[in-house]
Amino acid sequence: MKMRRITSLGIALAISMTSLCFAQDNTEVQKKRHIPKGRIGSSEHKVSEERVKSIEAVLQEFYDNHANLENADTLLEIRNKIKESIPLIPEQKADTRDMIQIKDSLLDKVKVKFKKNTDDIRKELNQEAEKKFPIAKRNETVKVYYKQGRAVRSVTGRFYGYGLGGKSVRLNSRWIPLFDMIPESKALFNKEINAEVRKEYVREKMQDYLNNRQRYAETLFAAEYTKIRNNNERLGYIYYGNRWVSAEDVLVSMLPEWKKKAKKRAEKEQLEREAREKAKRESGQGNQEKTENKSDEDDE
């Protein structure tokens, strides 16, 4: 007789969760696209960050010098200062594709490497699972794994049938309780458990396939985005506000806040000057009154 041997998927197989996982699996496959989520961190745009800081530094310099930020000549000076290190408006256009557009542009490359759709993969995996986890037939030689204390042992023998209530099986002259067997071995003799083990196998293999496809897509995305970033920054663009813009755009975006800040400072300084002048006037008037009073006393 041909021996059927079960390869371990892991002794601690969580069978109780399998049916729940598979109830969700088809939905997850439909929702889970094999294109990466696409997270672009600030650490990937160091050149852009430095350019933003340099524009802020120019504005800070003119602010500190009390320059009139409403004056056209002042704004021209600011722009000329920025142009010393960054082109205000690059001559060539930037690649402004957003993350979704970049991902969509890579779909064909992903499909070339991962040609099969999830339905085909699932069909193949179900066929694999049927071969990998058969139901034992009487008089077949099988190998089962069972727990004995903390140890997991194995026994090989001819399967002769079930004990009372189907709670044990006879291998050669030995009776092995199903309760002691690991899930994969129980699957040889119990149709319900067998179905759960097959589902778990398909679920794990399907997830491996999706994960591999995801990682490949993310690798493509990272390479494509790096190329876009390097080219845009080479042209003189800045990643600011989650999009590629020119230094002029950044300046225009920042100016209102700096003008507001300068106006607020000017108003505060005006109030302080008026208060000082008022105090000075009041102090002078008081001194004059004291002088007049002293003169009156001398006359008496």
Image (tube, helix red, strand yellow):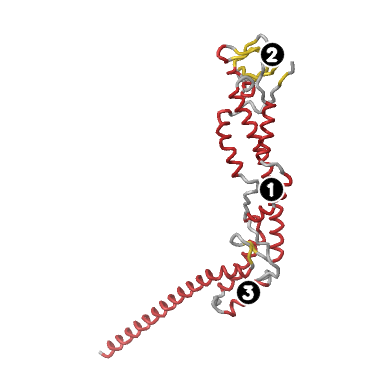
Image coordinates of residue 168 in percent, x first then y, are 59, 14
Local SS, label 2: loop
The answer to whether marks 2 and 1 mark residues whose Cβ atoms lie closer than 8 Å is no
Of residue 85 and residue 178, the one placed in the foreground of this image is: 178
Q: CA distance from mark 2 to mark 1?
A: 50 Å
List the single residue furthest toward the bottom: 299
Image coordinates of residue 270 in percent, x first then y, are 45, 77
Which residue is found at the position 69% from the left and 62% from the top? 232
Mark 3 or mark 2: name the one nearer the start of the chain: 3
Mark 2 or mark 1: name the one nearer the start of the chain: 2
Q: Amino acid at mark 1?
A: Ala
The quarter in which the N terminus is drawn is top right
Local SS, label 1: helix
Mark 3, Cα crowd under 10 Å, few <14 / some 14-19 / many 20+, is many
Q: Give the number of callouts.
A: 3
Residue under pointer 2 = 139
Residue under pointer 3 = 79
Q: Amino acid at mark 2?
A: Asn
Pair 3/2: label in front = 2
